Image (cartoon, coloured by chain):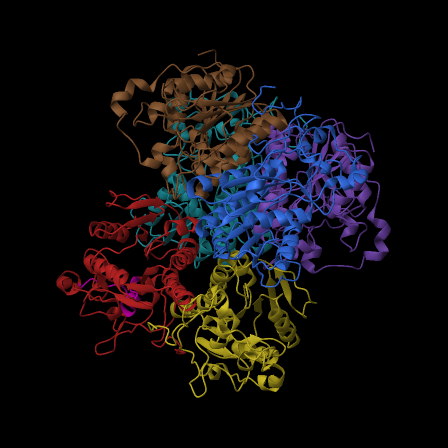
Chain colours: A brown, B blue, C red, D yellow, E purple, F cyan
Amino acid sequence: MSAPPPKPVLLTGASGNLGRMLARELGAAGWTLRLTDIAPFPDPLPPGAVFVRADLNDGVALLRQAEGCGALLHFGGVSVERPFEEVLGPNLRGLYHVYEAARRERARVVFASSNHAIGFHERPREGEPRLDLDCAFRPDGYYGLSKAYGELMGRLYWDKHGVENVNLRIGSCFPKPTDARMLATWLSYPDLVRLVAACVAAPRTGHAVIWACSDNPRSFWGRDHRERIGWRPRDSAEAYRAEVEGRLGDPVAERYQGGAYASIEYSRAAPSPRDPFALE
Amino acid sequence: MSAPPPKPVLLTGASGNLGRMLARELGAAGWTLRLTDIAPFPDPLPPGAVFVRADLNDGVALLRQAEGCGALLHFGGVSVERPFEEVLGPNLRGLYHVYEAARRERARVVFASSNHAIGFHERPREGEPRLDLDCAFRPDGYYGLSKAYGELMGRLYWDKHGVENVNLRIGSCFPKPTDARMLATWLSYPDLVRLVAACVAAPRTGHAVIWACSDNPRSFWGRDHRERIGWRPRDSAEAYRAEVEGRLGDPVAERYQGGAYASIEYSRAAPSPRDPFALE
Amino acid sequence: MSAPPPKPVLLTGASGNLGRMLARELGAAGWTLRLTDIAPFPDPLPPGAVFVRADLNDGVALLRQAEGCGALLHFGGVSVERPFEEVLGPNLRGLYHVYEAARRERARVVFASSNHAIGFHERPREGEPRLDLDCAFRPDGYYGLSKAYGELMGRLYWDKHGVENVNLRIGSCFPKPTDARMLATWLSYPDLVRLVAACVAAPRTGHAVIWACSDNPRSFWGRDHRERIGWRPRDSAEAYRAEVEGRLGDPVAERYQGGAYASIEYSRAAPSPRDPFALE
Amino acid sequence: MSAPPPKPVLLTGASGNLGRMLARELGAAGWTLRLTDIAPFPDPLPPGAVFVRADLNDGVALLRQAEGCGALLHFGGVSVERPFEEVLGPNLRGLYHVYEAARRERARVVFASSNHAIGFHERPREGEPRLDLDCAFRPDGYYGLSKAYGELMGRLYWDKHGVENVNLRIGSCFPKPTDARMLATWLSYPDLVRLVAACVAAPRTGHAVIWACSDNPRSFWGRDHRERIGWRPRDSAEAYRAEVEGRLGDPVAERYQGGAYASIEYSRAAPSPRDPFALE
Amino acid sequence: MSAPPPKPVLLTGASGNLGRMLARELGAAGWTLRLTDIAPFPDPLPPGAVFVRADLNDGVALLRQAEGCGALLHFGGVSVERPFEEVLGPNLRGLYHVYEAARRERARVVFASSNHAIGFHERPREGEPRLDLDCAFRPDGYYGLSKAYGELMGRLYWDKHGVENVNLRIGSCFPKPTDARMLATWLSYPDLVRLVAACVAAPRTGHAVIWACSDNPRSFWGRDHRERIGWRPRDSAEAYRAEVEGRLGDPVAERYQGGAYASIEYSRAAPSPRDPFALE
Amino acid sequence: MSAPPPKPVLLTGASGNLGRMLARELGAAGWTLRLTDIAPFPDPLPPGAVFVRADLNDGVALLRQAEGCGALLHFGGVSVERPFEEVLGPNLRGLYHVYEAARRERARVVFASSNHAIGFHERPREGEPRLDLDCAFRPDGYYGLSKAYGELMGRLYWDKHGVENVNLRIGSCFPKPTDARMLATWLSYPDLVRLVAACVAAPRTGHAVIWACSDNPRSFWGRDHRERIGWRPRDSAEAYRAEVEGRLGDPVAERYQGGAYASIEYSRAAPSPRDPFALE
């Protein structure tokens, strides 16, 4: 990993699983971190880090925490499928606060988007092309919809205010794969840490999109902005194949990239079309 | 216009300019209308129409108004650029309520989206291709972003629940064009009435997108789903050319399709790139 | 217990004491359960059951959980005397959401009402008649008032929309009686389970009221709709007489049916009259 | 009218139609009035009166306005059928505030209840008995339900705290009858003024219920507490018979005492039973 | 008036009486104004001015409006005595937003404080000293208390962040005096305009306090920071003496500097002591 | 300690550290206590005590708890520096509710104010005078500002309504000193208990201010109203000198009386002036 960034970096969602891991690793790498979450931070603070407990709904507090930061790593908000009302405040309003902070600071946003923003694309069959960064959004729930909203918020702030942002469409970021789908979607912790570091270090990013999974041969995803960022994954889910390849979901989950999220309350008579604009 | 639809039709935003016009015209065509708005309905009720004053934030009330309806014409919510907090409730939460209602009723949604969902695309120069329906979203403000969100909400409900929806990217719907940009974007009232009627009457729509402007030779927009809907505009802005063609906006407004909305608080050093994913 | 109901059954308040017991017993009896509560469900899910954590204040979420259900067992909300503001949302607004859901689904409501809706009736003295189902409401606090409100909400939905509902005026539902008053009011867990099952299985209920206590010889309560429901209690508090009969409350608690709830902040100079309409 | 009451009297809803009329008449009779409403008071203030604009949701403000008052005339809140959410705050929470104020002041409450609290009783046919004060509540909507709630709040405060309250089940209080139903339900303005004055002047009221209509031969209503209050109506709707007797509502409205309120969104297959507890 | 300030100036409360007057006069003097209010701006916009309708409760919006401003003229919020709940949001929360904006912009705050922050000081009798800037706060109501809070917020931001602020304890700013008390407290419109201009133009202010009244011989107030600001009033109430000198208030109002505000709901047995810390 | 007070005493914040200690000690001394907190009370209830869990935002509930009380010990609310939004409800609104309750009951308020209301005064150097009770407020954060607001609320209610109140500017109340600053600011638990008892027992207090620290030779604080209250501290921090005297904070913390609170987000270029009104 390159030298620590010259300015402090704000990390939202610091008390979540990915947040804690990032805080630990980036802190150990010498970064000056500002940590925030609505829940208390359960670990020892990394050296030089500050933690402020706050609600993403409180925009003025967030703007203040971001003062002087060069990058905002936005990993906060609801991170699983939940009723709409629970998503609205932390995810939709929270994104607005993060982008207002970035605009004020002329800081870059690294946004923990998700494959669930495009989860209703079918998985590619043998020989079919993988999905590219310019595919249509096809969210698979209110959570995924909030992630698409976040990417478009990023596009708006780039177009209107020149705020740079990198949108990490995270696949499945866990210590190791736990089901067959993760042979495609798994992102190792070290690959995420290097990705975040690259996003912050890149000289220019514009509005960028990254398929955030490890170097998995079965990945669903193709072209993105990794060259612009200067990142390549090093790990691969394939090492876990024997362990997980029989662990399948229901037929809806297996058909769509979003997996089990797609099948939550799925009520369609026939599968939705491959082409998002097609009639059937 | 074809025969009135067999089931009642709910119209949100009924007390707004477009809502009042649609209520009058569709009522006169024999439709059974349910009208709702947060503001009182200022006109005489069309025959057979019912008006219920209610807030789009009140989802249970909206679900009830929609009972038995075959189509929901969603023209409610904030309809101009406003601070984010004012957009959140009526536009974002309101959309969720409208789609939950449609899912319950197996009704079709006709959504008053807007060109401001793609307003940061540059205007096509002489000989350049027009924008097609599968272009990337490039919202030009919080209002436009709420419209993109609404189209993606429609895509989610189509993919997950088979709820049909037609998204009208309305250009500029006024009695007549009032500035030069409207030579491209103007939508006449009669064209809108016929479009809405076609959306409701079409046998199948899936998730459809319509560039809702009249038959303007200078239109920015190309391919869409009008054949699926069975609609063609009949009016044209060109008749008003002499009257308006000198009425230009500032350079930012003139460069982008969203016009003056794009230049509200515009703070970019250099114009944003043509390609939404490009670095510069 | 009869065969499981043909349609799923929604149980609110599933994480409370009665909710957990009902989930376990009805699940074991083969019912298809939808469970919901604002608190996480602490037990293993019964086979076939689904749990959704949600707030009774979120009506659209509740309406969705109820889709396809044939009966709603409403055991959620605040279940003890609390300041008014804490009762308002979950109990008053929550009831509206439950009844809107029932109306939409043409489902039957089984409502955990309470003796505290009539708790200011005096206890019958030796030889005096017991209270019948058509006695006046005499709530003994904000909690009891919310239960009376719920019964009247049931009456409104029955009169206006034909929604059937059974209102269980639960006495004291605990594993066993713990004070002398419960010799009259105790309801055993098995009697409650059979009662709920009977309420769901009954061919027609209309708007029904049940004195939900076991077959206690000292019961305060007489005639109700148990024949319509097809239920009779089998247990009796009398078996516990020796254990509890000296455990008395203060004089106000001993005078009124609601017991200790009646004496919370009681400030009357003289006892309130027997007849709810009497001057003194 | 008797001498003005010795202590000030608080009137909520002072800016509504009945509130303005009462303020004018009671003010002219020499009462010391405190007036409050969420809307400005549009008339000249009666001599000695004070007006404070406030929201019934603001309990601490209401408690303060009530200080030193001997009677609270509660005419505030939503006074027509509205979506539940609009009724909740001013009517349900508002009632709690009014009763807390009355308890603190040991003041009497005169509550503008409504016939809509019992509106789903059928109208009596020729020779059938009229409804007595101890009939069951049968609200005909959320508004009527809030009035039943208010009467039961009164019963609770009487039973628990000895707060006296008179519940006026107002029929139709307008300058003159405007449809055939009002031949039964009309209450003249002078009869209301005298009734309110009698409620305040009565030496003791306990928890009382009054059928608040004029001396109409066709009244639906019978026995109540008017003797306890010392009031008899003097006017009669019969004088307007010729003018209004053909003005009928729809069949549902004509069947039930609540009239047009009963038919709002009425969706029962068959009429609801005469007996509120009957199966059909 | 000196040259217009080099940076834009934000004026809150622009649609109020003083706000409109300041907008007109400062706009005419060539200032670049940003205007905001929760109510629409009723006048033609001054040249170069922008108006954004927004709520002082919306802090992120306010921070944005303040971007690039060199001074914030805070005239917004509730400007008369109102129930506490109505003061809380616009005045207390609003002040926090204004000061956060000023800190971000390193801008100076000119705060429309009020004599009601010290309104419970007695009026000086013949020969007694006038009140100096370091007198204790003695607010005469919730409004005055919010002004004292604002001055202390200013002190906090000065001490902690070096944000400069001038607190104008405005007496009675009207076109001309309308009662006898204003012979002491009147501030003419031109004097206010010159004062505001001086506050913005002063090279350094620190945390300053100004008795904002005209050059009235009967003024209650003495030493303040006017020399630091470089301002002296030019008008005098004395010219209106004959017109108003008999217009007196009640004895409480006449005793205290806050006048009629002091007597709103005044309930003390004996007058409060001269010394704010004295026992009696 | 003198005899228990004749009337019940309400203690807010009863579940906090100081609240629990006071409940235990005052309960053991025979006081009749009403305890309240938003968190459950974790200890056995003292004899005769009642605990009601409630939110300080719920004013009507607080007014009710205070009924019949002769003194309100207000130790509730946020007790450390927190983002503004978290301070607003419990501390600012909560104070209003406490004072309205006191006014209604003609009760005395004992308010747990704090040295942080004046924390930006510099610590006195050798030979310099200590701070007296009439020093200017110089809050060192939002928490300290809420305490200054509370003292001024007390002054308002004293001036306008004759409500007596004693404002304890608590230094550092812990079992024993834990750093060098507490050699000046420490208040022992027994000294606090005696102080509270004295505040309640004093025949008259008016609006009083107490520097609530033990008899520490290094105290920053001088003259106050302790004689009026009849209290003198008996303990001293000096006994702990050896243990703590090397435990210093950062230079900002060491300069100002508020210690570490002053240095939270401190961003001044140069130290703030000694004189609160000075330019520099």
Residue F143 in picture, x, y percent from top left:
51, 37
Is residue C250 within the magenta segment?
yes
- Position of the C terminus of chain A, as image quadrant, is top left
Q: Is residue D1 left or right of residue C99?
A: right
Q: Is residue B31 left or right of residue D207?
A: right
Residue at 34% over, 48% down: C37
Residue at 56% over, 82% down: D183
Residue E132 in picture, x, y percent from top left:
70, 40
Residue A121 in picture, x, y percent from top left:
43, 31
Quadrant in the rendering for residue C146: bottom left
Q: Nearer the viewer, residue B167 or F55?
A: B167
Q: Nearer the viewer, residue C106 or E103?
A: C106
Residue at 69% over, 67% down: D43
Query: What's the magenta bit mostly, secondary-structure-wise?
Result: loop
Q: Is residue F92 left or right of residue A122?
A: right
Identify whether A196 is placed above or below C225.
above
Quadrant in the rendering for residue B23: bottom right
- Residue, far bottom: D127
Residue B220 in picture, x, y percent from top left:
66, 33
- Residue, far top: A2
Question: Which residues make up the magenta segment?
Answer: C245-260
